[in-house]
Amino acid sequence: MVHKKDLVPYRNMLKDLMAKTEAMIAQGKTLDFILAANITKPYDATTKGDDAASTKRFVTELYYENKGLPPVVNGRRAMRP
């Protein structure tokens, strides 16, 4: 069972990272720049099972979400018609 109090810190992390990514995109920063900025570092100690590949996928999805592109499903990003 998951309680709201357990999800609030995760929600706050998502909001913070989305805002940071959005701000960098507004400044014209590229995906490579955002990946190199290591924006997840403040949360690394609180998330378990992460590795460099999963962090890269996560930040890449934040980037594309903020760019308005659809998510990856079954390994493919289906573009909207």
Image (cartoon, rainbow, N blue to C red):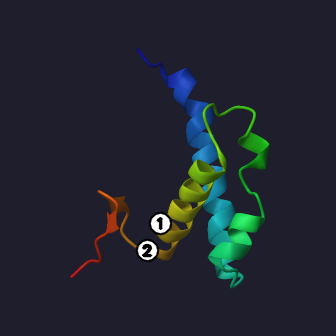
User: In percent of the image, x 49 and y 70: which residue is there?
Assistant: 64
Tell me how far mark 1 sits from mark 2, CA to CA: 5 Å
User: In percent of the image, x 36 and y 68: which residue is there?
Assistant: 70
Residue behind mark 1: 65
Give the number of the disc on residue 75.
none
x and y percentages locating residue 80 in the rendered image: 26, 77
Mark 1 neighbour class, 10 Å CA radius: few under 14, some 14 to 19, many 20 or more: some
Q: Could you tell me which secondary element the residue under label 2 belongs to?
A: loop
Q: Is residue 78 above or below residue 4?
A: below
The answer to which image quadrant residue 71 occupies is: bottom left
Count the numbered circles shown: 2
Horizontal placement of 38 versus 32: left or right? right
Q: Amino acid at mark 2?
A: Gly
Q: Could you tell me which secondary element the residue under label 1 belongs to?
A: helix
User: In percent of the image, x 31 and y 58: which residue is there?
Assistant: 73
Horizontal placement of 7 versus 36: left or right? left
The quarter in which the C terminus is drawn is bottom left
Residue at far bottom of view: 28
x and y percentages locating residue 21 in the rendered image: 64, 66
x and y percentages locating residue 62 in the rendered image: 54, 61
User: In percent of the image, x 72 and y 41: which residue is there?
Assistant: 43
Q: Is residue 16 above or below residue 33?
A: above
x and y percentages locating residue 41 in the rendered image: 77, 48
The quarter in which the N terminus is drawn is top left
Q: Is residue 46 above or below residue 53?
A: above
Q: Are marks 1 and 2 in contact (CB under 8 Å)?
A: yes
Residue behind mark 2: 68
Q: Amino acid at mark 1?
A: Glu
Mark 2 neighbour class, 10 Å CA radius: few under 14, some 14 to 19, many 20 or more: few
Residue at far left of view: 81
